Image (cartoon, coloured by chain):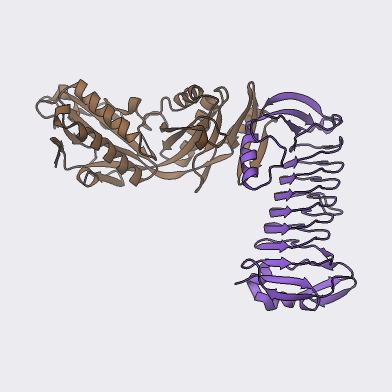
């Protein structure tokens, strides 16, 4: 079975909520089932085939989205299996609540990407907005599984209240990275603000360079060898998720432990050059 | 059957199902790997009294280990899952975690699991950290030289214990030389171990004994010093020394391959090497699920 390419008929206009447009639907009901899905654009509901031109193509069983300037929210939201390839930018909520499968975005993503994600893989070639891997508005649990790799920069509150999983941002992250984090791993390639790890209880934040000042509530645990870094580096390098500029050998790192203001024993590891 | 002048008895080795697992132990240097695995596999010759049977399967170069350090693959076998879990936790906890710079990983992935780091994490007293890397979960336990990294669990495989063959030699020197040649050959076979000291058993046993409570006693039929005295002695004229090699493996195929390699090495020495014949230990086929017929193994 070939994939399906979706191209908006009218890119200009309000955002289109893509929730429910998933490879599972294609696998279960074929192209007709996909075409009959009802989507919300602005204040109106439309059949998918009224909003998009459908063509066969792309990887087998996959959905290929070509936004062409349209704002597509909720791409891959709740996805459990299969593959979505976005040849352009996504709006908000890309991959939110994902449980499996792969979402590849060749452009950028808006806010709440991978919010409350529980499994699967999200790979973004460009930047992402705020709340990457965080809870949805009003939620209390952030990402609980899966892998997110962002080749560009990310906004504020990356991995907030994260419980499990991995977020690798090759560029910079905004403020409050890993805030109230419970577990999981965040890798930051380029830089972050000093308020990272605010109220963090457990989990790991990996940096290649120290923040300008020590985060409040963290204590310096000194430099040591961390064997798990070798395993993590191998795994991330295999997946192209190890940021450029991170050491490619050695397991030494400075460890900051915190946030002790909430009795947290999370860690910020600042990797040393080999 | 006679191979290169060595008589191969028309009999079979009787073996039993056991549950086993493979662990990969690493350390900063090969010497510290040895220190950890020798300690861990100590007193693990027979389930009769040791709780498990264990030995080093093979040493691993850095490029074959998860953390790019020298390592060793160790196989452990026990009679049931609960006992295997207990032995693994005790041995890793007391012998590997205590060894400087060590780390412990699962060497088997598929199948039911037993706790590894999941059982040892409590040593961290609340400061331990779970870390998922890829599809695997690890525990990082703070210790005095840094951190002990241990995979959370390891898979269990239904293996085979008690594969064996017995060398009947003209004297002890010849028997030992042949046994050592067999050991060297078997250690090249993946998935099989020789749990006894140096891979060789000199005190083979039979089930039970004349004394109450003895579950095993000396194999009188193969004691050269009892020839002519013990009932049903199987020691022929001219044989002064008998040694047994006991093999555990992750599969019947691994045990058969190990037997083939070991007996092949003995046969390679020929009759001039001093081995008169090769036989095997069994219980009449009534107890063990597996029978390894020597003629079929060497066919």
Q: Kindly indicate which chain is depicted in brown in the rendered structure.
A: B
Q: Position of residue B245 (x, y in %)?
A: 28, 32
Q: Nearer the viewer, residue B237 or A8?
A: A8
Q: Quadrant of residue A157?
A: top right
**Residue found at x 83% / y 59%:** A92
Measured along the vertical axis of the image, is residue B96 above or below residue B12?
A: above
Q: Nearer the viewer, residue B130 or A155?
A: A155
Q: Nearer the viewer, residue A209 or A257?
A: A209
Q: Position of residue B253 (x, y in %)?
A: 34, 46
Q: Nearer the viewer, residue B95 or A55?
A: A55
Look at the image and tell me whether residue A188 can be seen: yes
Could you tell whether A48 is left or right of B222 in the image? right
Measured along the vertical axis of the image, is residue B264 above or below residue A108?
A: above
Look at the image and tell me whether residue B209 can be seen: no
Q: Quadrant of residue A37?
A: bottom right
**Residue found at x 51% / y 31%:** B25
Q: Position of residue B131 (x, y in %)?
A: 66, 39
Give the quadrant of the C terminus of chain A. top right
Q: Position of residue B117 (x, y in %)?
A: 58, 35
Q: Kindly indicate which chain is depicted in purple in the rendered structure.
A: A
Q: Quadrant of residue A99?
A: bottom right
Give the quadrant of the N terminus of chain A. bottom right
Measured along the vertical axis of the image, is residue A241 above or below residue B142?
A: below
């Amino acid at each position: 079975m070939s994939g399906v390419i979706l191209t908006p008929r009218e890119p200009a206009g309000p955002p289109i909520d893509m929730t429910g447009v998933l490879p599972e639907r294609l696998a279960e009901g074929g192209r007709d089932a996909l075409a009959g899905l009802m989507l919300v654009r602005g204040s109106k509901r439309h059949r998918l085939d009224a909003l998009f031109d459908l063509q066969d193509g792309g990887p087998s069983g996959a959905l290929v989205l070509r936004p062409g300037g349209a704002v597509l929210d909720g791409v891959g939201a709740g996805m459990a299996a299969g593959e979505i390839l976005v040849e352009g930018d996504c709006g908000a909520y890309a991959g939110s609540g994902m449980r499996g499968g792969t979402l590849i975005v060749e452009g950028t993503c808006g806010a709440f990407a991978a919010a409350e994600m529980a499994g699967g893989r999200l790979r973004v070639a460009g930047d992402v907005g705020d709340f990457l891997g965080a809870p949805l508005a009003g939620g209390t649990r952030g990402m609980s599984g899966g892998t997110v790799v962002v080749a560009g920069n990310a906004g504020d509150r990356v991995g907030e209240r994260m419980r499990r999983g991995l977020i690798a941002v090759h560029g910079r992250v905004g403020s409050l990275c890993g805030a109230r984090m419970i577990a999981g791993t965040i890798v930051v390639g380029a830089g972050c603000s000093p308020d990272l790890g605010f109220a963090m209880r457990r989990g790991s934040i990996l940096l290649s360079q120290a923040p300008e000042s020590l985060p409040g509530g963290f204590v310096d645990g000194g430099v040591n060898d961390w064997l798990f870094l070798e395993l993590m580096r191998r795994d991330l390098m295999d997946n192209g998720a190890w940021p450029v500029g991170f050491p490619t050998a050695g397991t030494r790192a400075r460890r900051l432990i915190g946030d002790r203001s909430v009795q947290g024993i999370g860690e910020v590891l600042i990797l040393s050059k080999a | 059957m006679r191979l290169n002048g060595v008589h191969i008895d028309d009999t079979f080795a009787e073996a039993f199902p056991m549950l086993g697992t493979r662990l990969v132990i690493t350390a900063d240097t090969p010497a510290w790997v040895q220190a950890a695995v020798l300690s861990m596999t100590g007193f693990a010759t027979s389930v009769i009294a040791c709780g498990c049977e264990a030995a080093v399967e093979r040493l691993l170069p850095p490029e074959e280990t998860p953390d790019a350090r020298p390592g060793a693959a160790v196989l452990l076998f026990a009679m049931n899952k609960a006992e295997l879990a207990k032995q693994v936790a005790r041995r890793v906890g007391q012998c590997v975690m205590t060894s400087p710079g060590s780390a412990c990983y699962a060497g088997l992935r598929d199948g039911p699991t037993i706790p590894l780091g999941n059982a040892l994490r409590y040593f961290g007293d609340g400061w331990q950290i779970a870390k998922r890397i890829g599809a695997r979960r690890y525990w990082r336990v703070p210790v005095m030289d840094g951190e002990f990294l241990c995979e959370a669990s390891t898979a269990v495989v239904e293996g085979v214990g008690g594969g064996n063959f017995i060398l009947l030699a003209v004297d002890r020197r010849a028997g030992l030389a042949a046994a050592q040649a067999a050991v060297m050959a078997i250690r090249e076979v993946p998935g099989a171990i020789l749990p006894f000291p140096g891979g060789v058993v000199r005190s083979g046993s039979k089930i039970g004994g004349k004394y109450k409570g003895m579950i095993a006693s000396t194999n009188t039929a193969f004691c050269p010093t009892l020839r002519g005295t013990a009932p049903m002695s199987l020691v022929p004229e001219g044989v002064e020394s008998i040694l047994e090699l006991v093999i555990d493996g992750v599969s019947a195929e691994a045990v058969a391959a190990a037997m083939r390699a070991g007996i092949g090495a003995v046969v390679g020495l020929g009759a001039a090497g001093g081995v008169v014949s090769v036989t095997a230990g069994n219980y009449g086929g009534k107890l063990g699920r597996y029978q390894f017929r020597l003629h079929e193994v060497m066919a």
